[in-house]
Amino acid sequence: MTTTLTTGLARLADPASRAHPYPLLRELREASPFTDPASGIVVVGRRADCETVLRSPRVGSNRLGAGITKVPQQPNLMNLDAPDHTRLRRLAGKAFKPRVVERWRPRVRAIVRELLTDIAASGADGVDMVSAFAYPLPVRVICEMLGVPREDHPVFEKWAHSIAYTVDPQLVPGELTTEVERNVEEARAGFVGYFSRLIAERKREPRADVLSELIAAEEGGDQLDERELILTCVLLLVAGHETTANLILNGVLGLLRHPDQLRLLRERPELAEAAVEEVLRYDAPAQMVTRIAREPFTLGDHEVAAGQPLLLLLAAANRDPRQHHEPDRFDITRGDPGHLGFAAGPHFCLGSVLARMEGAIALDAFAQAFVEPKLDEASLHYRPHVAVRGPDHLRITFQAVRLDSLPAAGPAEESEAAHG
Amino acid sequence: MAERQWEVTVDQERCAGSGVCVAVAAGHFVVRDRRSHALSPVTAPDDAVLDAAETCPMEAITVRESGTGTLLAPVE
Ligand code: HEM
Ligand code: SF4
């Protein structure tokens, strides 16, 4: 039994399981909760247990020096506990509340239209949805919100991919990570240098962007110091980048593999929001998160010791039959959210409202614009990341791209200052 | 004279059940059936409740001063 479980985490760590992790996640969920003897990690996979841990005051998120992740953590929002966590979340959260995000809707629509226009203009009968659609959308949106110049986007691509590794758990002790670590170091140094320069610029000339707002909080005195300011910017830039891209890609994939669902979405565009919820459940972009026990507690009949790291398999919990009816079926009319795609508790995703809006606009546009889209199965390839899991190549073919079928945006559509 | 009490409401339509409020203001909220509820709709002033209203990702929590109805949070 023990040996099977140990190989379980090793198999999860193996990039070969990236394309189809769900049978393995089911095994781990049904065996959980248990302590993996090799790593000492408490594996939590059932929906009710995941929720208990996420909402428990007995666990913390400070993973600095905990060795649960492949690379050392930084004291950003994700690794803070109250009261510092609450203070930073108040500041960073302002820009991602429903009323503020809603103002970006026309701009998100416009960016989607721009991307589809480029795809149509290329004249090709196929496209890589990763590089032509799913990645550019969230990157442009978050950069515009933050106030990061568009011409700088390309330099972030590589850094952002590297930073996405920082949430990967160390599933197998001694897993070789020197290269990953080097890339992360490089990306962190790159981002710090970049934002230091940009912050200096904005201090001289404030604008109507999130960066200038955060700077005002820093200059206001006791709310935010310079290091926190930089770490927050990096986190905001990176947190919504791969995750949202993977939401769009997992959605495209789910729809192409379930043509009846694609047809349904095309006929009933009002299902776009529900489709996003189903993607977050069925093929979660953030597959797992980690926590550290601050005090001993019992989970089911399993004893968790103080200081023990926990691995919460959100993607497994989202398919727990105790919570979801026929969990392995992709059904955009399901209407029972209750997934843990954005986690829960104090660290519940700060950008959920924005992610949902981008996802719904993108999946709706995908369903409406592409005529006879087909998945090129051979092209599908996944990144090695285990926590923020998603394709790095996903080619589709199609007969045509119909831009006239996209919903019209308001008059603010072409204006980059739509958020003003 | 005693400080005025605060009135705390959670908009059930907006609430996403995240539980951020429970973590930020323990003892003031409980998540039941995926929605948060104020444990005491009228409470003595406590800054933690303002923090909860400001950090709620759905802007579902409102805090007002009893009697005057002055909005205390969210204001950011
Ligand atoms: C589909 C897209 C997204 C998914 C699946 C997702 C998922 C998550 C999850 C699971 C967490 C919790 C991490 C933990 O508990 O350790 C989280 C936290 C976070 N997310 Fe998202 N996210 C998405 C998009 C975004 C976007 C667009 C932003 C934009 C700013 C964002 C910003 C953040 C931040 C700042 C945190 C840290 C919050 C904290 O620690 O208090 N996310 N996200
Ligand atoms: S923080 Fe807001 S959305 Fe989350 S449970 Fe509390 S009231 Fe609901």
Image: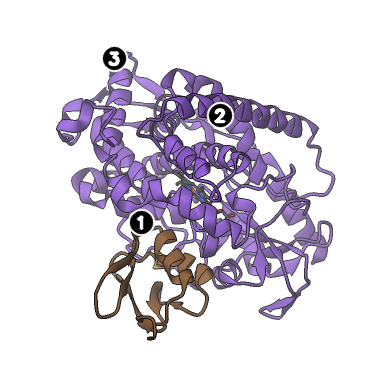
Chain colours: A purple, B brown
Q: CA distance from mark 2 to mark 1?
A: 42 Å
Determine whether the residue tagged by mark 2 lies in a helix, strand or loop.
Answer: helix
Sort mark 1 into few (<14), some (14-19) or many (20+) by Cα contacts within 10 Å: some
B12 vs A21: above or below: below
Give me the residue at 41% from left, 24% from top: A132
Q: Is residue A218 above or below residue B36?
A: above
The answer to the question of whether label 2 and label 1 lie on touching residues, with beta carbons closer than 8 A, is no
Label 1 chain ID? A
**A416 or A120, which is in the foreground?**
A416
Query: Which amino acid, mark 2?
Result: Phe
* Chain under disc 3: A
Q: Where residue A232 sits in the image (x, y, percent)?
A: 55, 42
In this view, the residue in front, A368 or A312, is A312
Give the amino acid at mark 1.
Answer: Asp
Query: Helix, strand, or loop for circle 3?
Result: helix
- Residue A331 is labelled as 1
> Which quarter of the figure is the C terminus of chain A placed in?
top left
Residue identified by numbered label 2 = A195
Q: Are marks 3 and 1 on the same chain?
A: yes
Disc 3 residue type (three-letter): Ala
The residue pinned by badge 3 equals A121
**Quick check: A194 left or right of B75?**
right
